[in-house]
Image (tube, helix red, strand yellow):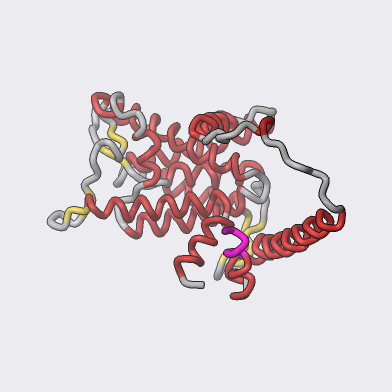
């Protein structure tokens, strides 16, 4: 199995968090066409980056989400994806994949609105890109739910999760007036949304259902309906019992092997699989 097949398999089995990381990387590769070699930076168009100018964002409302998948440089992307991988692992310990995606999208929109309104009232016109706000929401959400969780860090040993989150938030506050004030505004707004999300969830309100319903609507809208209705299909279901039993046994054995490998991934990660197990999953995915 080559590297491309390996990446495809990780995308299929890695869950929503891994897919979001892949989407961010893909968007960064696409955004290289906007790199300005003369200035040594990216020149994102206003239909991708989020602008604080109302004459721009009012006519391009999708930028309240698209900005959260683009990054202004490799290091910006690298560190954000490192923290996203860390935060998503903690969040998904307690919550579902759909809740993760819903929180990522809603927090990005919330933080984008906070950035645009703040800069508008400060009479500053500037664009913003980056997934940091959504990542902060996921990290703060996990911290709000389990603040005393022990996290093992290299060189430091075990520390409480809330200590890590508090340090990150304090650093944001300290740098607020130094540089990248728009980024820090969105970070803090994302953190606030993550806190609100968990508090509402604990009271029985799951905001991620909004995104789930929107996604389900578009999936059903564009899903192809069967060319022949099920009720008009006539088949002879009188098949020998022995053959039916044989198929069920085969399916159970294959599924059992898949479940065992997926359980191994959840405990030790994808990299712990043998070459044979990766090839088996890749064939099963086809």
Q: Main secondary structure of the magenta part?
A: helix
Q: Residue farthest to the bottom?
A: 275
In terms of image quadrants, where is residue 97? top right
In terms of image quadrants, where is residue 237? top right
- Residue span colored magenta: 281-286
In terms of image quadrants, where is residue 279? bottom right
Front residue of 36/87: it is 36
> Where the C terminus falls, by quadrant?
bottom right
Residue 145: where, in percent of width, then height?
65, 42
Q: Is residue 225 above or below residue 243?
A: above
**What residue sits 42% from the left and 43% below the top?**
173
Image check: 284 left or right of 54? right
Residue 211: where, in percent of width, then height?
53, 32
Q: Residue 236 in magenta?
A: no
Residue 224: where, in percent of width, then height?
52, 35
Q: Is residue 72 above or below residue 230?
A: below
Front residue of 159/136: it is 136
Image check: 31 left or right of 100? left
């Amino acid at each position: 199995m080559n590297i491309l097949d390996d990446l495809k398999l990780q995308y299929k089995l890695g869950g929503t968090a891994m897919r979001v990381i892949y989407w961010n990387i893909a968007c960064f590769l696409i955004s290289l066409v906007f790199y300005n070699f003369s200035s040594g930076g990216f020149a994102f168009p206003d239909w991708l980056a989020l602008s604080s100018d109302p004459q721009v964002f009012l006519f391009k409302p999708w930028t309240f989400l698209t900005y959260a998948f683009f990054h202004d440089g490799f290091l910006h992307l690298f560190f954000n994806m490192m923290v996203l991988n860390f935060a998503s692992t903690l969040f998904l310990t307690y919550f579902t994949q759909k809740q993760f995606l819903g929180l990522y999208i809603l927090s990005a929109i919330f933080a984008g609105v906070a950035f645009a309104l703040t800069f508008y009232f400060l009479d500053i016109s500037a664009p913003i890109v980056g997934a940091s706000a959504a990542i902060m929401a996921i990290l703060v959400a996990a911290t709000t739910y389990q603040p005393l969780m022990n996290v093992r860090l290299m060189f430091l040993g075990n520390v409480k999760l809330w200590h890590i989150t508090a340090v990150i938030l304090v650093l944001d506050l300290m740098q607020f007036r130094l540089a990248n004030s728009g980024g820090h505004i969105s970070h803090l707004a994302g953190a606030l949304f993550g806190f609100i999300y968990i508090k509402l969830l604990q009271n029985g309100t799951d905001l991620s259902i909004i995104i789930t319903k929107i996604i389900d609507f578009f999936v059903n809208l564009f899903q192809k309906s069967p060319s022949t209705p099920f009720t008009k299909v006539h088949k002879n279901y009188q098949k020998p019992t022995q053959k039916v039993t044989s198929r069920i046994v085969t399916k159970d054995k294959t599924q059992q092997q898949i479940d065992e490998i997926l359980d191994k991934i959840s405990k030790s990660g994808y990299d712990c699989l043998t070459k044979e197990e990766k090839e088996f999953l890749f064939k099963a995915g086809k």
